[in-house]
């Protein structure tokens, strides 16, 4: 070890001490350097290009400056001086091109460490925030719908965009074109939130119907679909039925007013045979005739899945009615059926009556506006007498006559096990006897509902000719109870009482008096009158004297 110079005093800066070091051993083999480069992902010899790294030759000697760590400390011996020293690079210029060995100090830069790990972006800390564009995946389908509209040259429907993730979308009479329906179908194909879709009255035609059908072949989350008044036609019927053969999600579908004809009925036959999930089918306001009715009637008989079917406002006529009635006989699952306004006629009505006598699962039937007459009404009345499950019967707008209306009301009143809740005889004329029977029914069933047409003074059948009429405008009770007295307003009651007075004493029992009022067939407050009659009989030794009523009748006769 060679120490240059002598140690200065404590007040002066110590002189730097220089020590010669052995020359740095150079790697002589290329393989060793390539090995180190490969560890750092560098190609062979790339480390020489990373900066001003110089490797000294073996003949040169590197000189470093050794400086004590404590500048003001005075070492007692050279060994103590070597304990705490700082080593810095000697910056003197050295000629590396000389081959002559020299003991002079040389400037050396050590090679970069080849095993140093590479830094990543996370290793850098900066206060600069770089705005990056963030892309979100649109699960609602709104962006997809806007792109599709742009491709098809359509104006996006704002209502659809706002409600695209709702569980119910109603777009009735929005004026959608077939292309607009196709755009909606493409978006709803992957929608899992929608359950009810209503596109009534948009005239999407067969092309739009095809798009909706293909969408529903993949989407089974929609359970309620309404495509009424869309002019789907035969092609649309075929597309919808193809979809129904594979769709397992739909429970209710409305296809009314789409111009289906008899030849389209065969598509629905396949659907009714294959689909095991559909519960409600509406085919009303189409063009099915007798031939279509016969085809659909057989399909109804083979299906036990449907709960509700609507065939109203078609042209089934007599043959179609008979076929549908036969289907109702065989069907054990149907709960409600609407056959109104199909022109059944009397024979068609009688076929329906036979079906009601057999089918005990049906809860509601509508056969309004089918040209049914009194004969059909009486046959149906006999059928519902043995049918305890039917709850709603709609037979309005038929030619039932007052006799047919009375027959239906009597059966409901007399049947102890009948579950009838509503009798709809809209626009069917009735008389006071019908009203009286309905009052009796309501006493037994307070929630019973009945609707009817005008109230006539008398019946409108041949048997009612010569029968004394009652003015429907006068809503005066035939018997009026005033405290302790009974006032007779309908003098026909006196004629009936005379028949019960066989001994000409003008005395009748309270039972005969009540029977005469019942025979009069007019509405009255039965409990109140009955209480007054029996009380009056008790006051008159158990019998009622009606001679005073006769005197009242004579006083009311006009003078000649």
Image: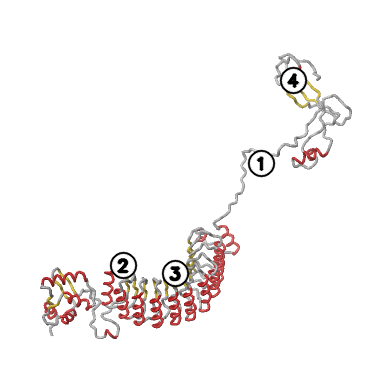
Image x and y of residue 147, in percent: 59, 60
C-alpha distance separating marks 1 and 2: 80 Å
Q: Which residue is mark 2?
A: 447
Local packing at callout 1 (Cα closer than 10 Å; few below 14, some 14-19, many 20+) is few
Check contact, mark 3 vs mark 1: CB within 8 A.
Answer: no
C-alpha distance separating marks 2 and 3: 25 Å
Return the mark for residue 307.
3
- Which badge, 4 or 3, is on the more N-terminal residue? 4
Q: Which residue is mark 1?
A: 121
C-alpha distance separating marks 1 and 4: 42 Å
Query: Could you say which quadrant of the image residue 458 lies in?
Result: bottom left
- Under circle 1, the secondary element is helix
- Which badge, 1 or 2, is on the more N-terminal residue? 1
Q: Nearer the viewer, mark 2 or mark 3?
A: 3
Eyeballing the image, is 57 above or below 524? above
Check contact, mark 1 vs mark 2: CB within 8 A.
Answer: no
Check contact, mark 1 vs mark 4: CB within 8 A.
Answer: no
Image x and y of residue 495, in percent: 17, 81
Local packing at callout 2 (Cα closer than 10 Å; few below 14, some 14-19, many 20+) is few
């Amino acid at each position: 070890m060679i120490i240059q110079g002598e140690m200065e005093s404590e007040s002066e800066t110590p002189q730097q001490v220089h020590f010669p070091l052995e020359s740095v051993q150079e790697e002589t083999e290329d393989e060793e350097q390539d090995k180190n480069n490969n560890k750092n992902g560098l190609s062979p010899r790339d480390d020489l290009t990373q900066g001003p790294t110089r490797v000294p030759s073996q003949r040169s000697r590197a000189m470093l400056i050794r400086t004590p760590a404590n500048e003001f400390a005075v070492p007692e011996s050279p060994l103590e001086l070597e304990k705490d020293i700082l080593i810095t690079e000697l910056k003197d210029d050295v000629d590396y091109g000389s081959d002559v060995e020299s003991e002079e100090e040389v400037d050396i830069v050590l090679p970069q460490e080849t095993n140093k790990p590479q830094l990543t972006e996370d290793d850098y800390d900066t206060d600069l925030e770089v705005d990056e564009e963030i892309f979100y995946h649109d699960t609602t389908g709104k962006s997809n719908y806007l792109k599709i509209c742009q491709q098809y040259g359509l104006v996006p429907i704002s209502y659809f965009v706002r409600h695209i993730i709702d569980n119910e979308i109603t777009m009735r009479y929005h004026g959608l074109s077939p292309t607009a329906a196709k755009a909606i179908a493409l978006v709803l194909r992957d929608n899992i939130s929608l359950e009810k879709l209503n596109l009534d009255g948009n005239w999407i035609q067969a092309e739009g119907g095809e798009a909706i059908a293909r969408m529903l072949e993949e989407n089974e989350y929609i359970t309620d679909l309404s495509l009424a008044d869309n002019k789907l036609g035969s092609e649309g019927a075929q597309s919808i039925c193809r979809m129904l053969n594979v769709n397992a999600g739909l429970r209710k579908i409305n296809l009314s007013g789409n111009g289906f004809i008899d030849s389209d009925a065969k598509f629905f036959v396949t659907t009714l045979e294959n689909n095991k999930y559909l519960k409600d089918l509406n085919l009303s306001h189409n063009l099915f005739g007798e031939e279509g009715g016969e085809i659909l009637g057989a399909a109804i008989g083979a299906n036990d899945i449907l709960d509700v079917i609507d065939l109203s406002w078609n042209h089934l006529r007599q043959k179609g009615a008979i076929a549908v009635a036969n289907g109702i006989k065989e069907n054990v699952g149907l709960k409600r059926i609407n056959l109104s306004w199909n022109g059944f006629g009397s024979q068609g009505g009688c076929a329906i009556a036979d079906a009601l006598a057999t089918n005990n699962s049906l809860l509601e039937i509508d056969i309004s506006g089918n040209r049914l007459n009194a004969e059909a009404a009486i046959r149906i009345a006999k059928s519902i007498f043995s049918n305890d499950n039917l709850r709603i019967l709609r037979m309005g707008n038929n030619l039932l006559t007052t006799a047919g209306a009375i027959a239906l009301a009597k059966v409901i009143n007399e049947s102890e096990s009948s579950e009838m809740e509503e009798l709809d005889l809209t626009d069917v004329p009735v008389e006071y006897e019908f009203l009286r029977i309905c009052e009796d029914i309501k006493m037994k069933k307070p929630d019973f509902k009945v609707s009817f047409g005008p109230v006539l003074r008398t019946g409108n059948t041949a048997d009612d000719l010569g029968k004394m009429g009652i003015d429907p405008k006068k809503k005066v009770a035939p018997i009026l109870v005033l405290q302790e007295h009974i006032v007779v307003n309908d003098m026909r009651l006196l004629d009936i009482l005379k028949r019960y007075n066989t001994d000409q004493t003008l005395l009748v029992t309270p039972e005969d008096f009540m029977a005469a009022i019942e025979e009069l067939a007019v509405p009255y407050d039965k409990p109140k009158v009955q209480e007054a009659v029996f009380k009056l009989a008790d006051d008159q030794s158990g019998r009622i004297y009606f001679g005073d009523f006769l005197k009242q009748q004579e006083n009311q006769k006009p003078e000649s």
